[in-house]
Image (cartoon, rainbow, N blue to C red):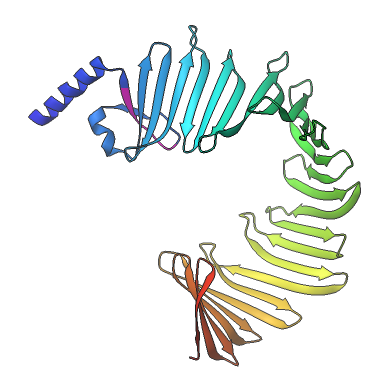
């Protein structure tokens, strides 16, 4: 008890003598709860805050090691004028006008390379243009925003400037709304090479059409039933391939077929357990029927995969530890080789049983 009282008195004296304050925090650097300095080692993350007039320093610690440091400079009315953030091998300096971000300088502290971003706003204080410059002040690219009367972005144009100061092909994004609903997007160049994306009034994706100079090269369409099961049909112009996928409302692929013209190339069915872990896959191709069986350890990690072709096993993959596994190869049901892998690199081969 006496120790606790002494620690409290010491903490109180320290906080009166020095401007530091400490907070329980998280990886985002939030001030979750004020704490005494002697308690900082109780938490994975804690934040130290030092105030000195119009300057404030925040340092985030993880397990008592600094993660990042931010210097904040305030104007007399309490708005942020400038902040300098040092994190890993990057230093970022931001300046503000009022409450709006005006410029941002990002420096790689290893080689002092980096770039500068300048932010410009329209009369309604909405972002209008972002220019990116070299540290020497040379314009490298510029992004401009066009808005409708409600302030929504309807067009984004990114212009890239080459070393000889010539402007490369602009990259454009356009958006069309109906009321509050986004119905269409376009991302591409002025020669109509890019992607059209379409949505229904409920915000669900309906189609993605890829084009090259105005000519459709692939088209993917999305169909939903009343239970929100999803069917995706994709057609690739160059190969004539048609790919059909059936997906559950939770995003699990349960069936996929690939055909070219009237000829079926492959058909795959996936089967899951009650925990949505894949336990079996059946793939039908010209060479026959492949069956994949998946087994899991008690902690839910994949432990092995067995592959059968037309009823006979021909490969088994067994996971030994993180990033390490071996494959047993079979012929007519008899194992003839084992290959060991580490980080997807072959490390050893054993022949025979």
Asked if residue 326 shows in the view, the reply is yes
**Front one among 42 and 222:** 42
Quadrant placement of the N terminus: top left
Residue 316: within the magenta? Answer: no
Q: Is residue 197 above or below residue 91?
A: below
Q: Residue at x 62, y 59 (%)?
A: 252
> In which quadrant of the rendered view does residue 230 lie?
bottom right
- Residue 287 horizontal/vertical position (percent): 73, 83
Q: Residue at x 69, y 56 (%)?
A: 229
Residue 26: within the magenta? Answer: yes
**Front one among 244 and 60:** 60
Q: Residue furthest left?
A: 2
- Residue 177 horizontal/vertical position (percent): 79, 32
Q: Residue at x 84, y 55 (%)?
A: 218
- Residue 71 horizontal/vertical position (percent): 45, 22
- Residue 111 horizontal/vertical position (percent): 54, 37
Q: Is residue 267 above or below residue 224?
A: below
Asked if residue 303 shows in the view, the reply is no
Q: Is residue 28 left or right of residue 212?
A: left
Q: In this picture, which residue range is highlighted in magenta?
A: 21-27
Marks counted in the figure total: 0
Q: Is residue 209 left or right of residue 348?
A: right
> In which quadrant of the rendered view does residue 31 lie?
top left
Q: Is residue 95 above or below residue 240?
A: above
Q: Residue at x 51, y 16 (%)?
A: 80
Q: Residue furthest top?
A: 76
């Amino acid at each position: 008890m006496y120790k606790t009282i002494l620690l409290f008195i010491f903490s109180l004296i320290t906080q009166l003598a020095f401007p530091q304050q400490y907070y329980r925090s998280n990886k985002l650097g939030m001030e979750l709860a004020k704490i005494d300095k002697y308690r900082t080692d109780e938490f994975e993350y804690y934040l130290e805050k030092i105030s000195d007039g119009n300057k404030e320093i925040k340092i985030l610690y993880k397990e008592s090691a600094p993660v990042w440091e931010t210097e904040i400079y305030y104007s007399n009315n309490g708005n942020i004028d400038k902040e300098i953030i040092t994190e890993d091998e990057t230093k970022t300096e931001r300046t503000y006008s009022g409450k709006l971000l005006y410029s941002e300088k990002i420096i790689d502290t290893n080689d002092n390379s980096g770039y500068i971003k300048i932010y410009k706003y329209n009369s309604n204080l909405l972002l209008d243009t972002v220019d990116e410059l070299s540290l020497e002040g040379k314009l490298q690219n510029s992004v401009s925003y066009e808005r409708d009367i409600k302030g929504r972005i309807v067009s984004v144009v990114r212009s890239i400037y080459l070393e000889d100061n010539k402007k490369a092909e602009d990259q454009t994004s356009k958006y069309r709304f109906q009321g509050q609903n986004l119905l269409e997007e376009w991302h591409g160049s002025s020669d109509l090479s890019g992607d059209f994306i379409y949505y229904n009034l409920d915000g669900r994706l309906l189609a993605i059409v890829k084009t090259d100079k105005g000519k459709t090269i692939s088209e993917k369409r999305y169909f939903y039933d009343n239970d929100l099961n999803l069917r995706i049909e994709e057609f690739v112009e160059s190969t004539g391939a048609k790919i059909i996928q059936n997906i559950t409302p939770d995003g699990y692929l349960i069936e996929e077929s690939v055909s070219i013209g009237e000829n079926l190339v492959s058909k795959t069915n996936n089967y899951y357990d009650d925990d949505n872990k894949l336990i079996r896959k059946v793939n039908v191709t010209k060479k026959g029927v492949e069956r994949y069986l998946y087994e899991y350890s008690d902690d839910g990690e994949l432990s092995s995969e067995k592959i059968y072709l037309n009823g006979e096993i021909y490969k088994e993959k067994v996971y030994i530890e993180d990033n390490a596994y071996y494959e047993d190869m079979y012929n007519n049901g008899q194992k003839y080789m084992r290959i060991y892998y580490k980080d997807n690199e072959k490390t050893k081969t054993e022949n025979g049983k």
